[in-house]
Image: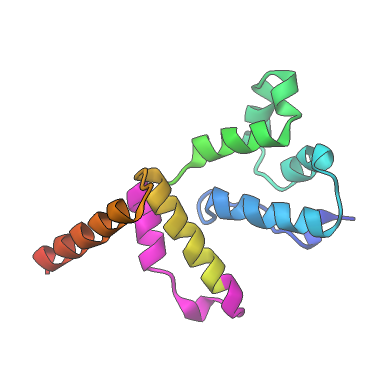
Amino acid sequence: MDVRKIVPRFNPKEDEIGLYLTIFERQLKFLNIPESKWIPYLTSLLPTEIPQLITREDEGNSQDYRKVKEMLLKRYRLTADVSDSYFRNQDKRKHNLEGFFYFEIASYFEGWITELNIKDFEQLKSLIISDQIKKKSIS
C-alpha cells in the first residue's frame, strides 16, 4: 500500500507535527501496519532534511518509532503561544468534516495546556481567567 495516497506529505511551514503524527498513526493502524514498520513510511512523507536528522540518531533510536516521534515533537514543538493562537484562530469553513474540525481544535488546546504544564482544574481555571483579563486589557 502506498501510504502517500492516504497521508499527505508533511509541510513544516503549514502543518503542526503533533497533529500530523496523530493522523499518520491512525491511518497506519487502520491499514493494520505494525508499528515496527512505520519508520520507512514516515520518512517517505517527510522533507529530506528530516530523515537526515533521524539517520544521525543512534541506530536503535532511529528504528524505534516512539523515539523518532519524541525527537520530532521536540524539534517541531509548538510553543504555548502558537498552540493558543492555532486553537483560537481555526476556521471551521476550511474543514469539510465536522469531526476533523473538533479533532484539530482539541489537539491545539491540548498542546497549549501541555506546554503550560496545566495539570488540574484550578490551573486551567486560572489560565482561562488570566487569558480573558489579558484580552480585555488589550482591547
- Quadrant containing the N terminus is bottom right
Picture mark count: 0
Residue at horizontal 50 percent and vertical 35 percent from the top: 74
Residue at horizontal 16 percent and vertical 60 percent from the top: 134
In the figure, is residue 40 to the left or right of 65? right
In the figure, is residue 20 to the left or right of 55? left
Looking at this view, name the residue that lies furthest to the left: 137
> Which residues make up the magenta segment?
79-100
In the figure, is residue 114 to the left or right of 81? right
- Quarter of the image for residue 90 reads bottom left
- Quarter of the image for residue 130 reads bottom left
| Residue 54 belongs to magenta span | no
Q: Position of residue 105 (x, y in %)?
A: 47, 66
Looking at this view, name the residue that lies furthest to the right: 1
Q: Position of residue 112 (x, y in %)?
A: 39, 52
In the figure, is residue 138 to the left or right of 101? left
In this rendering, is residue 120 above or below 74? below
Main SS type for the magenta part? helix
- Quarter of the image for residue 47 reads top right
Q: Position of residue 26 (x, y in %)?
A: 72, 57
In-front residue for pair 129/21:
129
- Quadrant containing the C terminus is bottom left
Q: How is the image coloured?
A: rainbow
In this rendering, is residue 56 above or below 136? above
In this rendering, is residue 112 above or below 59? below
Residue at horizontal 79 percent and vertical 45 percent from the top: 41
In-front residue for pair 65/5:
65
Q: Position of residue 127 (x, y in %)?
A: 26, 55
In-front residue for pair 50/130:
130
